[in-house]
Amino acid sequence: MLQELSHMDRITQLQDEIQQLLTIMSSSIAYLTSRSNFLQVSPEIPVTKSRNADKYDPPDVLEANKKELVSDLIVKAKQVEYLIQSLPEPDPEEKQVERLQALEEEMAQANAEYVQAVNRAKSLHGQICEVLRNMLDEPDIVQDEAG
């Protein structure tokens, strides 16, 4: 079930398994509430509703289905537990702080390089605009040199 996965792949797989577990739980509750008959559980509280026989499962079928639902829940819960156990231990807080500081320094350096590149691009743009203006303002000089 669990191949050699990256940490994010494991987290994604864990999310998928938890979603499936919740789906099984929801389906189980929906089945139990819609396919069981009303039974009196206390002598003080009478059953005031009943269902048609085609609307609920016979007791033996209901019991078999409940066991299957419980089995499905247990298997999926064990899969979720296994995935949780396979997740790596988080780094110590000091190491996380060091890593964040290093990333912050890298980001500041990259930002400085970006600002430098933008300024260089603006400078080159200004130079090109100036050359083009000179060429357009002085067409006679270009023709004299060509002729």
Image (cartoon, rainbow, N blue to C red):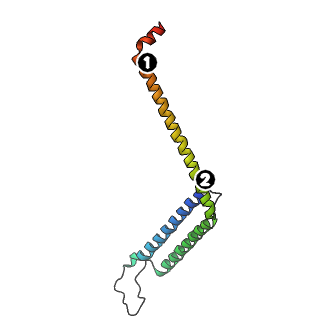
Residue 59 seen from this side: yes
Q: How many residues crowd around disc 2 within 10 Å: few (fewer than 14), some, or many (20 or more)?
A: few
Asked which quadrant contains residue 99, the reply is bottom right
Q: Secondary structure at mark 1?
A: helix
Asked which quadrant contains residue 101, the reply is bottom right
Query: What label does residue 21 carry, if any?
Result: none
Residue at image coords 55%, 41%: 113
Position in image of residue 3 (x %, y %): 64, 58
Q: Secondary structure at mark 2?
A: helix
In the figure, is residue 62 to the left or right of 8?
A: left
Above/below status of 29 relative to 113:
below
Foreground pick, 45 / 3:
3
Determine the residue located farthest toward the bottom in the rendered image. Answer: 43
Position in image of residue 18 (x %, y %): 53, 66
Position in image of residue 41 (x %, y %): 43, 88
Residue that numbered label 1 is attached to: 135
Residue at image coords 58%, 50%: 105
Query: What label does residue 102 carry, if any?
Result: 2
Q: Quadrant of the N terminus?
A: bottom right
Above/below status of 147 relative to 22:
above
